[in-house]
Image: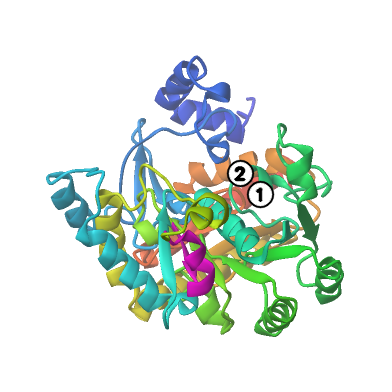
Amino acid sequence: MTQSRQATIGEELEIRHTKSAELYKQALDVFPSGVTHDGRYMRPFPIYVTHARGSRKWDVDGNEYVDYFGGHGALLLGHCHPEVTEAVSEQVQKGSHYGASHALEIEWGKLVQELVPSTRDGGKVKFVASGTEATLMSLRLARAFTGKEVIVKMRGHFHGWHDYATVGMSEPWDAPSSNGVPLGVRQSMRAIPSNDIAALEAALAPGDVAGVIMLLNGLSTAYLEQVRELTRKNGVALIFDEVVTGFRYAPGGAQEYFGVIPDLSTHAKILAGGYPGGSVSGRADIMGMLDHRDDANWQRYQRVSHPGTFNANPVSAAAGVACLNVVKDPAIQKRATGIADKIRAGMNDAFERRGIGGEASGEVSILSIAFHNPKVTGRELIWRFRGAMQLGGVDFSYLGGVVSAVHDERDVDQTVTAFDQALERLQAEGVV
C-alpha cells in the first residue's frame, strides 16, 4: 500500500482558499500583480478578508486567523475597538469632510502635545493624511529652516514611499529601492550605517546637512544621545520617525522609552486609531516655517506651504482622539509587550526543540523572526513562512508582526503551536 504524500504548503493553501484564489484571478485584471499594497503581494495568492474583531480576522473561505499584521502596525487596540468604533460611527453621521476647521482637530492636536515629548512645552503640530506625507513634510521643514539641502538617513530605514525615502532603503545602497527616482533627489540624500557614530560624523562634516531622519527600533539610549549631541552641535534638525514606534513603545513613543528628544517627530498609524492620518510635530521655531504672515516675500519665497484634502478630516480625528485617550494609559503598552514576550519565548523554545537555527526577537510589542542560514531566502522564504503560519490560523507580516493590547493567552497558545507546526513543514520541505 502506497503511503500518501502530504500536501506542500502551497498546495494546502490552494485547497483551503478556493474563494481567495478566485478573487485573486479577478484582481489580476484590475491591479498590477493583483494587489493594492506591496506588502499584500503573496504567492500563490493573498488571502481576502471579510471582517475582523479584536485580535482576529476571517477570510472569504471562513478561515479564522490570529492577526499580527495589525493594520500595518496601526491597531495597537486591535480591530474594531469599541471606543474607536463608537467615535467613528457617531462622526460619520455628522459628516466625513467639512472643508473647514472643527473642534476635534484641536482636541487631537492637544493630545499629541500632551503625549509626545518633542511637542510638549510649546511645540506645534500639523496633521497630514499618512506616514509617507509626514516624513516628506518633515524633510521639507528641515530644509526650509536650515537653508541646506542634504538629508542624512540610516541604511535600511523605511520612511514611506516618496522619492527621498527610496534612497538607501536596500542593497546596493547607492541605488533607490524603486525605479523612477530622479538623480537630483538621490544626490540630496546621504545614507549611512545605523549605530555608527563615526559614519554620522563624516556625513555631517561637509556642513551641507539640513536634517537627520531615523527610526528608533533596535537602538540604544547611549547611541541616540550621541546622535542628539552631534546634530545639535552641527545645527542639524533631528527627526525621529515614529510612524510605527509612536504610542507603541510608551504613551510618548520610543523617544519617551529611550529618553532622547528630537527636534521633529513624525507619526501615523496608531495616531489615527487605524484610520488615515499622520502628523509632524515638534519645535515651535521649526514648525513656525508653516506660519502665515502679512509679508508677501515670506508667503511667496520662505514659507513652507501645506495643503492636503484629508488633513485632520473629522472621521480620522474622531478615531485619533478616541485611540489616544486609551493608549495614553501605559498599561496598554505593558499588556501588549507582555503578550509579545510570551510569544517570543514560545517560538525560541520551538527553534531549540526542533534544532533549527533561528531567533524570535524584537522590542516591546513588535515581533521579529530570523532564520539562521535558511536554504531558501528573500521573498520566497517570506511567502513560505507566512503561508505555513496561515495554515495554523495565524497571519504574520513578512517575518514578524505586531502584537496588540487585546491579544490574549489563547492567542499565544495558538500562535506558538502554529509556529512549531510551521517549522516542521518548512524543515520537511527543505526551506530551513
Answer whether residue 282 is magenta in the image.
yes
Q: Quadrant of residue 183?
A: top right
Q: Amino acid at mark 1?
A: Ala
The percent position of residue 42, horizontal first and vertical second, equals 58, 34
User: Residue at the location (27% across, 65% down)?
Assistant: 106
Question: Label 2: how many residues lie within 10 Å, few (<14), some (14-19) or many (20+)?
Answer: some
Q: Would you name the residue on which mark 2 appears?
A: 162
- Using the rendered image of the protein, determine whether residue 328 is visible from the camera's viewpoint: yes
Residue 165 tag number: 1
Q: Which residue extends farthest top?
A: 29
Residue 399 tag number: none
User: Residue at the location (83% across, 66% down)?
Assistant: 203
User: Residue at the location (57% across, 52% down)?
Assistant: 301
Q: Is residue 153 left or right of residue 1?
A: right
Marks 2 and 1 close (CB-CB < 8 Å): yes
Give whichever of 87, 419 is nearer the camera: 87
Q: Is residue 248 left or right of residue 220?
A: left
Q: Amino acid at mark 2?
A: His
Q: Which residues are magenta?
A: 279-292
Answer whether residue 269 is magenta in the image.
no
Give whichever of 325, 427 is nearer the camera: 325
- Using the rendered image of the protein, determine whether residue 343 is visible from the camera's viewpoint: no
